[in-house]
Each structure stands twice: as C-alpha cells, then as structure tokens.
C-alpha cells in the first residue's frame, strides 16, 4: 500500500512539474512568438483636455490626466478589460466620444529571467510607453497601416508592469502591440534593413559618369551612364552587370550622338548576371560648345507660364524680378541635377518653338509627353492604339449645375441659417478652413468658404490638396478609355506593359490597380508616375501570392494604371487630365502635382462639377464622357464576386464595395425615435475621402452632392462632419429641419 501511494505521489509530482512546465512555456509563447500580439489589456475611461482649450495632439500626449500615470494598473476605477483575438484593439468601440481623448492601457506579464526585449507597435495617433514605471518611448504619429514601430526595452525577472498611454485626434483609434525577445527583435531589424536596402536599390537612378553635378553635357558625344548606387547594384544583380543605352533627340528620333543643343532622352537597360533587368529613363540637356553665351539668351524667356499657380497679372506686375530669378534658375540648371534640367529644357523649347503657356504645358507635363513617346518607340507601339477622342458633343444640353442659391435660401432660410451655423461652429471648434458645395437635382443650394489660416482668408477659389480623392479622378479618366474600347477593365497590364505577365499569380489587371488588390503598397514611391519605366520597378515589389488575394489600400496601383494610359495615348497622364476632364468640364482651379493616388489640388466647386457628371451617368453640359454602360461598370461592387478569396489589411475596408476609383460611403446612425440603425442620406452614397479631410459624396438615390476642400487635416473633423451630414439628411431626405 505504501509502495502504491509512493508511486502515486511521484506520478502526481511529475504531473505538477509537467503542468507548470507547460504553463511556463505557454506564458513564454504568449509574448515571445512572432505571430502573437497582446490580446488583452485593462483600459481606463477616456480623458479629455479642459473644455474649450485648444490642445494639439502632440500636446495632448504631454498632459497628465492622472497622477503617476506610469503606475496605472487595473485597480484604478472606471476601467474595463478588453480583448481582441487578432490583437487589434479598436478603442473607438468602447469610447463614446473619441475626439481629442486619451486612455491608459495596462498589462502585467511574468518573465522567468532578466532580458532585453522589443515592442512591435502599431498605433493611429500617438503613445507613451512605461515599463516598470520607466518611460521607454514617446512618439506622435500614425503608423497603423504602415510599418510597425520597433521599440527596445528591458524586462526584469518576475512581474513586469506595462502602461501605454494612447491619444486620439479624430477618427480611427486603434492599437496593436506584440512583445519580441531580443533575438526575434534583432531578426525584425535585420529584415527591415534588407527591405530598406532593396527599396534603395529599386530607387536607383542612372546618371552621367562625368562631373559631380550630372544632368547636363556638351554636344558632340553622349556620356557614359552609371548607377548612382553602384555597390548596391552589384550586390543585388549578382556581382556584375552591363548597361545598354538608347538615345533620342528633342523630336523623339533615335540618334547616336548629340548634334544640336537641347533636350535628349535616354532609355537604359541594366542587365545583371543573375538575369534581373532594370529599366530606367531620363532627360539630359546638352549645351553648345560656347555655353557661356547663355547669359545673352535669357531674354528669350516667355512672358508667362504657370508656376506654383501664380496668376498672369502677378507675373506681369513683377516681370523684371521674375525674369531675373528665372535667369538664375536657368544658369543653376546648367550645373545642378535632374528637375532643374527639365525646367531648362522646357524653357529652351518654349523659346525655340514659341509655345503659348497654359496649365497643360509645364516642365513636368512636357517631359512626361516626351518619355511617353519614347516608350512607344521602344515598345514598337507608335500608332498602334486608337486615339482617345475628346468628350462627344450631344444634342441635349445635359446636366450642367445651376446656381439657385439666392432663391433657395430665401425659400429655406432656417435650413440655410442652421447649415451656416454648423460650418461657423466647426471653424470655432478648431476646424481648418474649408469651402463647401451642397447640390441637389443638379442645382447648387449652398456654396461658401469658411475660416482663415496662415495664408489669409480661405475663398471658394482657393485650390487645396484633395489627397486620396485623386484616386477617383484617375478612375473617371480611365472610364473614357474603357468607353472607347481602348483599354478593358479586366485587361492584364502585360497586354500593354511587357514587364508584367499575361497569366499566372503575378498577372495584374486594370481592375486590380483600381481596387487596391494589385499586390502593391504605398503612395508615390520610386518617383511615382513621373518615373518613365515605373512598371519595371513595381513588378519587382509584388510577391507571388498577393495579386487578387489581399486588399491593401495604396496609390501605386493607380500610378501603374497611369503608365498604361500614357503608353496607349503617347501623352503625359497629367496632360490627359487637362485635355479630357478639366478643360471640357470647366474645372478652372484644378491641377495635378505628382502622384495619381494623392496629388490633385482643387476646389469644392470643381469637385461638384465632376460629381454632377458622374451623377448624370457620364454627361455634362452638352458633352458625353462615357456611356451609361460604362457608368455601371465603374460603380462600387462587392470584391468577392471578382476575387472570392480576398482578405483585408484592416477592418476599416473589410467588405466595403469598391469601384474604379470609387467606394461606397454609406453611413449608419441610431434613429433617435426608433433606436434602430438607419442610413444618413441613402445606402447608395459613393465617393472618396482624403487625408486632408476634403470630402466627395454623391448620393445616387437622392441626387445629392456634398463636396468640401481644405488645406489641413482632420481637426475635430468627425463630430462636426456628422452634425453637418445629419442636418442635410434631416432636411433634404427626411423632411425635418
């Protein structure tokens, strides 16, 4: 009996050891695995700055809402435990008012020994992190949809207390955090370094081997071209490489030596010993032998051309000073790099050909035309594609916006009074200046600007960067190519750009580009659309298994689609915008700067013109831009019908119907009377928002347009926009003032 009891206790002791061993391993696995985030936190109530006090977000981070915030723990009243299976904690879901607020998150972990560790952190606005009452990190900024921030710290043996103070400016309020061992953290850093190195490699430029300042030369012979990062090129091309170059003169004729002064373009292929081919293009300016006479040529500069949106009247008033300045810029261009050379080439050609300046003829646009034509020659695509026709004139004088503000406001004074008050209060409540158009049934009911900033009064003619609303512009331009059967929505990119395959897991279609499913990420990388051979670079960034399987919001797909439109037209994508959208529609205060996903500047009125054209299903003011059939094709649809296995980078876009540059913008609220969810406006609201908090909304069911543009971001944006939206919904849709 004693023997049996002894064996029993030995077994029991063994089981206890096993259990504790398992528990210990489990505890360790919770915090030191590459795929495991912190799933639960104790979180405080929300704290706010003093009422009426303007607190910038970075200042908000410095406000001590509780004493000894570094000692915060789950014994503090007015808190709760939160849990997320994927480690993504949406603080908005349990905070009633999240604008300009702060919370404290607490977690205790036990570690068996003293060791170094790393936080891998994603946050929407800013955090302070305390470990065992020591401040280990404090930073402001949004990296939630980008690279996780890696933060080193030290864990002691036994219990460790982690406090994270998280702040929110407006809108999204999320945090995601994992703890890595020192070894795992170093592995992430190494991988990041390799990734950065690879991006540097892909951003590599080709330049003349002579001189320090590189983008000019002398007539007679072409210079030898070399990479600006030769060591990196050797490393990532297998140790050795060769460069093959073709040259073109100002008239896009291939030449073998520079005979005359002026612009010359090159196309270079870098062939690595590992089989990789890098393609690059660029512009050089060649001077005649007696280049010192340039000082005498400055008088042939044009009287005016648009730069930084300077009006012609200002140019004429300050003509002498501008000419002097431009003279300096021109001379500097002889010695300084790439973009100055574009200006020098442009001015030289304007003077030589007596060009008349307009917004379609800027140094970047002109250079874009030039390289689009070179690409057509390189790929043998001259005169292959049908010419894109200008918007077709139709007999019906269709759908031009009519301004009925005065009449409408006289008939609806209370609605307009309250609308104006909401806008005025918005400015008073830390809102950035903005202009706004409200239209219904093709009639402008309200159009005004509010506020001022460092630049002075904000007017209805003040262009502002509309950021991601640019994507919608790109989609609407593309609709014209679709309508004229020049490019198909589901055409593979490789049909036009041979760097991409026609079939297989890396075959990207135009639909992929416009619905954020191309396998690309980021905005404006690798010189954006101004890189003549951007597609060659982008193909090397796409992983085999990402095309059509993962939704990742980005602008690079739009730039890639732009390269297709440039190739088939032989024109800069920005010239296409001016000739086929802005000019015909009468959008007088709209222009591009750099990227197809993020760079249009416009006004609320110009946006409303574009919105009305879409609402009219492709017609405006006696012109047809695309047919009703094409209009149906570009509307948002459930991505699952095209990509059944699609996954999403974040919950914000999960399941959201996507179109060709457009998204569904439905907004649900609790009905105050019934307590049930209802739509504000309708469920068929399309458009896009922006990082500058500009807005573009089209209610397809109620024929309502709401557009806003502003210079800055989202100061108190959410609550104020909701008040505005509710007011419009109550009066124009529900009939309640």
Image: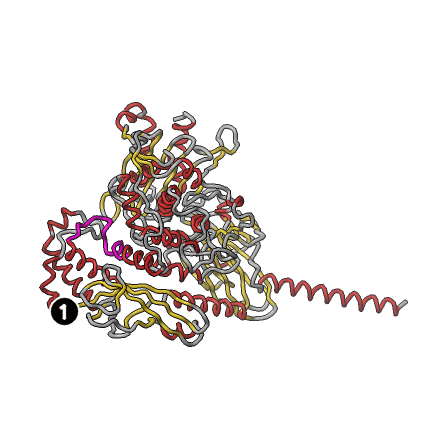
In front of the other: 67 or 631? 631
* Mark 1, residue position: 291
Above or below, 136 against 656 in this view is below
User: At numbered mark 1, what does the secondary structure look like: helix, strand or loop?
Assistant: helix
Above or below, 684 against 152 in this view is above
Residue 278, image quadrant:
bottom left
Asked if residue 124 lies left or right of residue 182, the reply is left
Point out the residue furthest to the bottom here. 239
Asked if residue 39 lies left or right of residue 354, the reply is right
> Residue 573, how many percent across, how many down?
32, 51
> Residue 317, how many percent across, how many down?
11, 49
Q: Which residues are magenta?
A: 354-367
Residue 363 counted in the magenta span: yes
Residue 76 counted in the magenta span: no
Residue found 32% across the figure and 47% down from its top: 387
Q: Residues within 10 Å of mark 1 (few under 14, many from 20)?
A: few
């Amino acid at each position: 009996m004693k023997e049996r009891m002894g064996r029993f206790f030995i077994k029991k002791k063994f089981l206890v050891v096993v259990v504790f061993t398992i528990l210990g391993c489990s505890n360790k696995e919770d915090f030191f695995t590459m795929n495991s985030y912190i799933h639960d936190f104790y979180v405080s109530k929300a704290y706010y700055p003093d009422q009426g006090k303007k607190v910038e977000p970075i200042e908000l981070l410095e406000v001590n809402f509780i004493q000894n915030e570094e000692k915060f723990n789950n014994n503090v009243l007015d808190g709760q435990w939160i849990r997320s299976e994927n480690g993504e904690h949406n603080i908005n879901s349990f905070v009633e008012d999240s604008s300009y607020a702060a919370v404290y998150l607490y977690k205790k972990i036990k570690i068996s020994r003293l060791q170094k560790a790393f936080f891998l952190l994603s946050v929407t606005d800013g955090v302070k992190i305390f470990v065992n009452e020591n401040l280990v990190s404090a930073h402001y900024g949004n990296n939630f949809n980008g690279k996780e921030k890696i933060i080193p710290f030290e864990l002691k043996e036994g219990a460790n207390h982690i406090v994270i103070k998280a702040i929110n400016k407006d809108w999204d309020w999320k945090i995601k955090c994992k703890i890595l061992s020192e070894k795992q953290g170093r592995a992430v850093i190494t991988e990041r370094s390799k990734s950065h190195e690879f991006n540097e490699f892909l951003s590599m430029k080709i330049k003349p081997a002579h001189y320090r300042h590189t983008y000019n030369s002398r007539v007679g012979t072409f210079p030898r071209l070399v990479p600006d990062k030769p060591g990196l090129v050797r490393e990532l091309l297998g140790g050795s490489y060769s460069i093959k170059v073709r040259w073109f003169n100002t008239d896009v004729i291939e030449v073998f030596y520079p005979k005359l002064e002026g612009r010359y373009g090159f196309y270079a292929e870098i062939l690595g010993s590992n089989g990789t081919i890098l393609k690059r293009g660029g512009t050089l300016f060649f001077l005649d032998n007696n280049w010192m006479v340039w000082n005498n040529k400055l008088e042939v500069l044009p009287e005016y051309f648009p730069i930084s949106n300077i009006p012609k009247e200002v140019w004429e008033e300050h003509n002498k000073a501008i000419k002097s300045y431009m003279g300096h810029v021109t001379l500097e261009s002889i010695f300084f790099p790439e973009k100055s050379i574009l200006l020098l080439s442009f001015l030289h050609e304007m003077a030589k050909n007596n060009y008349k300046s307009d917004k379609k003829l800027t140094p970047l646009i002109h250079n874009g035309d030039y390289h689009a034509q070179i690409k057509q020659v390189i790929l043998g695509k001259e005169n292959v594609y049908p010419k894109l026709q200008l918007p077709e004139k139709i007999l019906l004088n269709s759908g031009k916006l009519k301004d009925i503000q005065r009449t409408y406001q006289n008939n609806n004074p209370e609605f307009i009074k309250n609308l104006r008050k909401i806008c005025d209060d918005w400015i008073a409540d830390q809102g950035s200046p903005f202009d706004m158009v409200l239209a219904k049934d093709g009639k402008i009911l309200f159009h005004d600007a509010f506020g001022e900033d460092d630049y002075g009064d904000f007017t209805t003619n003040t262009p502002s960067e509309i950021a991601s609303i640019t994507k919608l512009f790109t989609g609407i331009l593309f609709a014209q190519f679709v309508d004229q059967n020049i490019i198909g929505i589901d055409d593979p990119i490789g049909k036009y750009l041979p760097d991409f395959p026609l079939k297989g897991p890396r075959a990207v279609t135009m639909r992929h580009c416009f619905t954020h499913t191309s396998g690309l990420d980021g905005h404006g990388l690798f010189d954006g659309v101004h890189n003549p051979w951007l597609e060659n670079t982008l193909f090397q960034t796409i992983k085999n298994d990402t095309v059509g399987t993962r939704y990742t919001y980005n602008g690079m797909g739009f730039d890639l689609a732009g390269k297709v439109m440039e190739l088939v037209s032989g024109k800069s994508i920005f010239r296409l915008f001016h000739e086929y959208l802005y000019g015909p529609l009468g959008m007088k205060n709209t222009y591009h700067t750099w990227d197809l996903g993020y760079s249009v500047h416009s006004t609320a009125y110009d946006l409303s013109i574009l919105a009305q054209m879409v609402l009219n299903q492709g017609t405006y003011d006696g012109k047809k831009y695309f047919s009703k059939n094409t209009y149906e094709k570009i509307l948002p649809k459930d991505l699952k019908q095209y990509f059944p296995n699609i996954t999403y980078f974040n919950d914000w876009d999960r399941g959201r119907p996507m179109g060709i540059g457009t998204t569904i913008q439905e907004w649900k609220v609790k009905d105050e009377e019934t307590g049930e969810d209802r739509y504000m406006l309708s469920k068929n609201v399309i458009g896009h928002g922006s990082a500058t908090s500009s807005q573009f909304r089209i209610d397809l069911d109620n024929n309502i347009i709401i557009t806003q543009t502003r210079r800055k971001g989202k100061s108190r944006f959410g609550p104020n926009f909701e008040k505005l939206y509710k007011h419009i919904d109550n009066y124009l849709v529900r009939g309640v003032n």
